[in-house]
Structures are given as structure tokens and as C-alpha cells.
Image (cartoon, grey):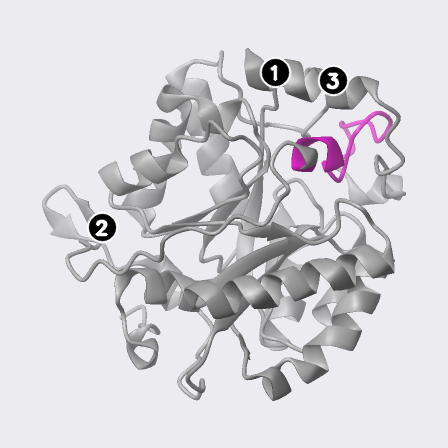
Amino acid sequence: KREEARINAIEKAPNSVLDQIPVARESVDEEYPVEGVYWSSPIEMEVHTQAKSEKPQKDSKFKEFTASNRTVKPLWRINSVNTEDLRPGPQIAIVIDDAGVDKLGTKHAIELAGPLTISFLTYATKLNEQVQHAKSAGHEIMAHVPMEPFNKTLNPGPNFLRVDDSDEEIRKNIKLALTKVPESVGINNHMGSRFTSNVRGVSLIMEELSLRGLLFLDSRTSEKTVIPKLARKYHVPYVTRNVFLDHEPSLEFILAQLEVLEKLAIKQGYAVAIGHPRATTISALSQWLPVIAEKGLNLVPISVIMAKRIGIPRNLIKLTAK
């Protein structure tokens, strides 16, 4: 209740951040109206936007996925970007989510120096084409799955995961989402402050991810998230977003957030940031990406952060499907 009250207070306050990305109707499923859809979720981001340091996890006893008494070859490693040539040093993963709907913004994000992690909204169109463009540019792929927020006025998009739906309906929508984005290493939540706080709903997600060997990046739109606890229970590799880059979409703010990200990576050995395919975010990254190597920092895809957390040497991350 305290978190819901906090969100409601934010929503009632003047909020210049709340912008909607203009979207052409052909970018969306034909039966789904463009009007009233929040393609970005700055209100949700306000819930927990400060840089969050977490104790690095290095669990050499982490068990890979098992299902029906057999080991599942993890797709998060099969679909990962090859990163054998990484230098030692702090690691930073930049995740661009909300990708795929604003196709021009997504194209510009893909054109940035990588490897980035591009997380595509599962209801975007022409996903195969966009994913292959991102893969060919050397980026890693995730599925950005819409989930229910506490704020009932926000619309996460079609087929979003709802707390009050039946197990059957939730499973159906999870499976649908996982088929939409090919060659992904895992998922992160789009909005989802309510859903990621719900044990039953998140358990259903984890069951499906564990069967496929996929990871979960917690966008952390709720301080009550149950993702870490349930990911451990179901042996699903997970990592938490540390920094939101652009909940205030000015160039100066984003560059300042990148400085926060650098300090956090140096402090704990790695850090994960989430940004969006907006002009100011892309401009900030185009300035920042060429100089991070000079600072002794490594830009890596999310799979490398995951491997670091569970003790897999970076030269052994990539697996073949055979």
C-alpha cells in the first residue's frame, strides 16, 4: 500500500518527463490502438531510479537448468555474443529496451558501437528483420515483456501479464512473448511494478524460463520485487538493473547518469544500465561509448555480466546448440 501511495503521488505531480514516443500505426498490431499507450514508462521508472549497488554474486555452485531430470542447454549462452577477447577490468552492460516500436529510434540505437543489449517489445512488428539487424551489428538480444503496473491508467501493451489472470492465461502470454523475439538470451520487464511483486505470477515466468535456459533482467520498477528470490528457487540466472539512464530525457542528465554508472562499475566490478531509443539517449551514448575503453572500462552484453555473477569464465560463456 505504501508503494502504491507513492506511485499515485508521483502521478498526480506535474511530470514533464512523461513523454510518448510518436508511433506510426503500421508499427503496432492492427487490432491494437495507438492512442493511450505509454511506449516508455517514466512514471514506473520514478519508483526506484537511484543507482542501486548490489553485493556481487559469485556462486560456483549455481546449478544450470534442469527439467524432467535432464539438463537443459541454456539458450542464454547459446544466443550470447562471442566475447572471448574481453580485457580485464570493470564491466558495463547498456540495455536499450522499449526497442522495436519506434523503428527509427531503434535503428539509430543499433547503429551505436557495441556490444549493446537490445531488448525488443514483444508486440513490435517486423521483429525478425529488426532482430537480425541488431545481431549483425554485434548486439545481444532480449525480449521486453509487458507486465502489469500498479498504476491502472498505464497501458503496458497487448497481452501483458496480469496478476489476476489464471495460471493458464499467464502461461499462454509468457509463451507467446517468448516466441516473438528470436535468438534472445532472456527477458526483462516492461513496466510491471505490480506483476513483479507477485509470487504466483513471477513463479510462472520462472518456470517457463527455466525450461528454456533463459535469463531474467529485473528492470526493478518495484522495490517489492520478488524476482531475485524466485529466480534462485527456479535456478534462473538473474541480474538487477542498477541505473536508469533517461527517466529525465535531457542530454546533461543522461551524461551525468553515465558517470554514476562508471563509478558503480568500478566499485562492484560490473553495472547494468537501462536506456531507451530516444534521440537524447542515443546522442549521449554516441559521445560516451568511444571513450570508455580509455577509462579502463569494458562494454559488455548482459550475458557477460550474468556469467561474472555466477562464476563462468568469459571464454566459456558461448555454447553451441548441438
Residue range highlighted in magenta: 30-45
> Mark 3 — residue?
9
CA distance separating discs 1 and 2 = 35 Å
Q: Which residue shows up at 84% across the image and 34% down it?
A: 18
Horizontally, residue 276 falls left or right of residue 296, namely: right
Q: Position of residue 141 (x, y in %)?
A: 54, 60
Tell me if label 1 and label 2 are in contact, CB under 8 Å. no
Quadrant assignment for the C terminus: bottom left
Question: Can you tell which mark lies on residue 4?
Answer: 1
Q: Which residue shows up at 64% across the image and 68% down it?
A: 134
Indicate whether 111 appears above or below 147. Answer: below
Q: Which residue shows up at 89% across the image and 35% down it?
A: 16
Dot 2 or dot 3: first in sequence order is 3
| Residue 52 visible | yes
Q: Amino acid at mark 2?
A: Phe
- Residue 211 is drawn in which quadrant? top left
Tell me if label 2 and label 3 are in contact, CB under 8 Å. no
> Mark 2 — residue?
65
Does dot 1 land on a helix, a strand or a loop?
Answer: helix
The verdict on residue 247 being magenta is no
Does dot 3 land on a helix, a strand or a loop?
Answer: helix
The nearer-to-camera label among 1 and 2 is 1
| Nearer to the camera, 302 or 89 | 89
Query: Looking at the magenta stretch, what is its main secondary structure?
Result: loop
| Nearer to the camera, 111 or 244 | 244
- Give neighbour class at mark 2: few <14, some 14-19, many 20+ (Cα, 10 Å): many
Q: Which residue shows up at 70% across the image and 54% down it?
A: 245
| Nearer to the camera, 123 or 216 | 216
The verdict on residue 42 being magenta is yes
Q: Position of residue 227 (x, y in %)?
A: 40, 36
